[in-house]
Image (spheres, rainbow, N blue to C red):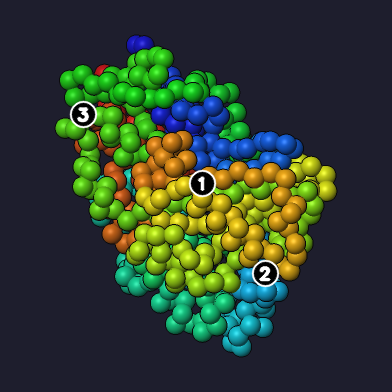
Amino acid sequence: MSQKKVVVIGAGFSGLSTACYLVQKGYKVTILEKNSMPGGRARVIKEDGFQFDMGPTWYWMPDVFENFFRDFNYQVDDFYKLSRLDPGYRVYYGKGDFIDIAADPEEIIKTFENEEQGSGVKLRRFLNQAKFNYRVAMNKIVHLPGKSPFELISFATIMRLPQFFNSIQSKVRSKFKNPKLAQILEFPVLFLGAKPKDTPAFYCFMNYADMVMGTWYPEGGMFAVVKAFEKLAVSSGVEIKYNQVVNEITINQNKVTGVRSNDQFVEADAVVSSADYQFTESILPSNCRNYSAKYWKSRVFAPSALLFYVGFNKRIKNVEHHTLFFDTSFDSHAKAIYDNKQWPEDPLFYASFPSKSDSNAAPEGMENAIFLIPIATNIEDTKEIRNRYFDILMDRLESVTQQSVRNNVVYKKSYCVNDFVNDYNAYGGNAYGLSNILKQTAFLKPKLQNKKLPNMFYAGQLTVPGPGVPPTIISGKIVANLAIDYLESVV
């Protein structure tokens, strides 16, 4: 019997994960990647001695990475070196007004107690609940294929049922009155792409990932992790073809037969697309799509982002590797994203300074920085708007950290809505997929398998478990198993 063939569209984390699991089972796997390097949103820029991760910069939930490599009889340190950041991050609330989140949970408890009497004890209880939820999520939920609501029924999930109908905001603010502390506890759900008031309280497990499991840094940045996935895939027998713009998925007798890219056709017994779900369906005949244009318009998408990759010719003071600027109104910014669909007047923003932890990230004596402003999808994106917001960032950075930096910029590149569309075919220019609100959780997310083409599958942040690097890695494993079940069922 000839070796069965699978084509994976996209070499992001979910595509690479899928390919590794499929090739492990003996299938011939080819990845077709639109761009010139792996990683998808986790690509890298290397210019003028500076290195910038283009997308994800936070390394949370290290157990997911450990479990992935363990599945192939490797360990994380076979591929890259990890170090835990201390502090994990800094949060600014105004000029010289900040809180550092230490690596040691006991130190975080002390920090909370210093800010608000009695909050240390409350935080300890809160993190214990978050730990329980994390274990339920990882053991009972995130590895499920999202086919049916009955998947969620277990003693552990039933006991937590009220937490799916209350918000993380109500849970946090009923316990912590200090607005600074509340914002720290609400911040991790931003990774889920929704407002805290719309995110189920069950997702407090992200606080356990934050404060107990910690914030880590892979030497060489997140692209070092991408390269590890690529190395594992290629060494296992996966063929990766870059600069391949997929323009057709061929079909015969209600089954996918292959994928056509800009310069070739690759035959397939099954296809897994880790590209944007809506884009993938747009190159299928309309009667073979899982979802209509009306469906995608009705979804609540996580934000897009305006990013700046900036090189400074001096070291930047008063910042940590990860620094959050919460010195303006969170609620106003959230309304601009989700309610008004417009550019925020006074944006919150995030900054990463990898050269604080990695001397190879910038030339000696210099600093590299990645700035991110969450913004609405499908909004106007022009050079003039980008420049205006860069000026806002520089003004705020100088004011809040009390130093002059604007005249020390020697490298600058921006990335925004139009780029997400052009580079990733991202629906509306989204950066993070779908918001993890209740009506878009678990079995209510877009399905992993095509309902009309049994050998067509989907992976990535628009499916279960959801947005973020760890969930997309898990998505790859779930989808690979579905594809293997199908391939083993047909002769």
Compared to 264, does 294 lie above or below? below
Residue tagged 2: 400
Q: In the visual, does 70 lie left or right of 22?
A: right
Closest to the observer: 382 or 177?
Answer: 382
Q: Check the image and name the residue furthest to the front.
A: 384
Q: Amino acid at mark 1?
A: Lys
The picture quadrant where one finds residue 170 is: bottom left
Q: Amino acid at mark 2?
A: Val
Compared to 444, does 196 lie above or below? below
Compared to 141, does 7 lie above or below? above
Relative image position of residue 449 (x, y in whole percent) = 28, 37
Label 1, label 3: how far apart the Cα atoms are: 36 Å
Q: Give the mark, 2 or 1, whose residue is nearer the N terminus.
A: 1
Closest to the observer: 136 or 199?
Answer: 199
Say which element carries label 2: helix
Relative image position of residue 21 (x, y in whole percent) = 46, 32
Q: Amino acid at mark 3?
A: Pro
